[in-house]
């Protein structure tokens, strides 16, 4: 089968597409014919050896897919020919992938493969961040950094679906339309966002900041919080891992909360399906419509990864494995 392999840790440009042996299914695994694969920032970090998981070389990246079941274990509740999303962790940038039954997620009627492949990583991360870790309540206000990318647009839609008002932060004017189209009520530029937040909230600040960027925005994000506000740390696409002076937390009665979605569910995979079911309830309500920023052929995987590495993504980036 065709697959994209990381053979050296030299970044996206070194990922090679070619023939590899098709997976042989163990009795306890599901074999999926992949139609679409989601591309996420951790895939970029994996090509550089900078992710917390460091698989042996060579390996096939790709943590999230949508496709059709080819084979499934008896008694798993899954059937041959069933359309599914899945979170196999690795191996998704290929024509076939194995995934444990607990990580295979049935699609509701009417959901296409593009939508399904865009949901697992970004939307489940944001749902976990906002609803579970951030304790977001209906009527609160959320500030979303990196709001034109895959995580950012997902955060906007999940927050709106949970009943929040969203202020989106983007780095350049050309990204404003993407954040607005995702559903943000207000879109502001990163340069001066703290003052914009103060103006938009009549000086009160926001209840929750969702930050996948980090870097030099961090301190102003803390200053943008209302009393008892929560800053959710998702990642560090800005490069620099910030530090916090904890006296700020004490004086303002605010929190900095780590969001490690994978670290939460991977040791307990039975937690994944209830999260998916909650997300499907929000999708059924009409508020979850992932913007697809770009779709690349498998042979163009280096370009897909570079789009994320260079922070040029507008919405979710997908690989089209087969039609």
Image (spheres, grey):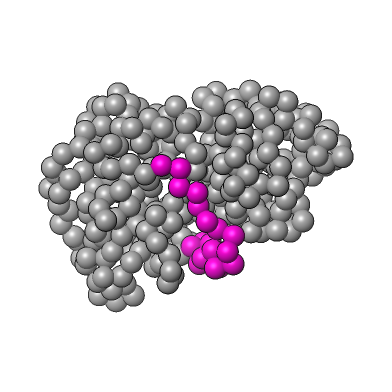
In which quadrant will I find the C terminus?
A: bottom left
Instruction: Classify 172 as above or below 114.
Output: above
In the image, residue 275 lies in the stretch drawn in magenta = yes
**Image-quadrant location for residue 246:** top right
- Residue 133 appears in the rendering: no
Span colored in magenta: 274-294
Q: In x, y percent, where is residue 34?
A: 27, 55
- Residue 285 appears in the rendering: yes
In the image, residue 256 lies in the stretch drawn in magenta = no
**Image-quadrant location for residue 42:** top left
Answer with left or right where residue 90 lies relative to residue 126: left
**Image-quadrant location for residue 127:** bottom right
Q: In x, y percent, where is residue 300?
A: 28, 36
Instruction: Classify 109 as above or below 304.
Output: below
Residue plotted at (37% across, 58% down): 113
Residue plotted at (50% across, 49% down): 291
Residue plotted at (37% across, 44% down): 295
Q: In x, y percent, where is residue 95?
A: 22, 51
Q: In x, y percent, where is residue 252?
A: 82, 36
Answer with left or right where residue 146 lies relative to residue 272: right
């Amino acid at each position: 089968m065709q697959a994209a392999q990381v053979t050296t840790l030299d970044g996206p440009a070194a990922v090679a597409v070619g023939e590899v042996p098709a997976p042989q299914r163990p009795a306890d695994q599901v074999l999926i014919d992949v139609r679409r694969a989601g591309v996420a920032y951790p895939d970029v970090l994996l090509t550089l050896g900078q992710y917390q998981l460091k698989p042996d070389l060579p390996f096939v990246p790709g943590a999230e897919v949508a496709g059709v079941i080819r084979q499934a274990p008896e008694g798993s509740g899954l059937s041959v020919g069933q359309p599914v999303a899945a979170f196999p962790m690795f191996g998704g940038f290929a024509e076939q992938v194995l995934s444990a039954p607990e990580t295979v997620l049935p699609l509701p009627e009417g959901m296409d493969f593009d939508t399904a492949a865009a949901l697992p990583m970004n939307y489940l991360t944001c749902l976990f961040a906002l609803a579970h870790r951030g304790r977001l309540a209906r009527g609160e206000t959320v500030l979303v950094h990196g709001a034109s990318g895959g995580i950012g647009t997902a955060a906007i839609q999940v927050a709106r679906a949970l009943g929040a008002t969203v202020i989106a932060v983007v780095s350049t004017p050309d990204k404003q339309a993407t954040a607005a189209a995702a559903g943000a009520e207000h879109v502001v530029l990163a340069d001066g966002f703290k003052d914009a937040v103060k103006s938009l909230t009549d000086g009160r600040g926001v209840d929750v900041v969702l930050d996948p960027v980090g870097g030099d925005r961090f301190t102003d994000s803390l200053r943008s919080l209302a009393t008892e506000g929560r800053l959710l740390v998702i990642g560090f696409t800005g490069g620099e891992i910030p530090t916090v002076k904890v006296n700020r937390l004490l004086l303002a009665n605010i929190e900095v909360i780590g969001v490690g979605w994978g670290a939460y569910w991977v040791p307990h995979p039975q937690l994944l399906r209830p999260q998916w079911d909650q997300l499907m309830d929000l999708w059924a309500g009409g508020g979850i419509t992932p913007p697809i920023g770009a779709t690349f052929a498998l042979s163009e995987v280096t370009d897909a990864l570079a789009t994320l590495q260079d922070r040029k993504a507008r919405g979710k980036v997908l690989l089209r494995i087969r039609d």
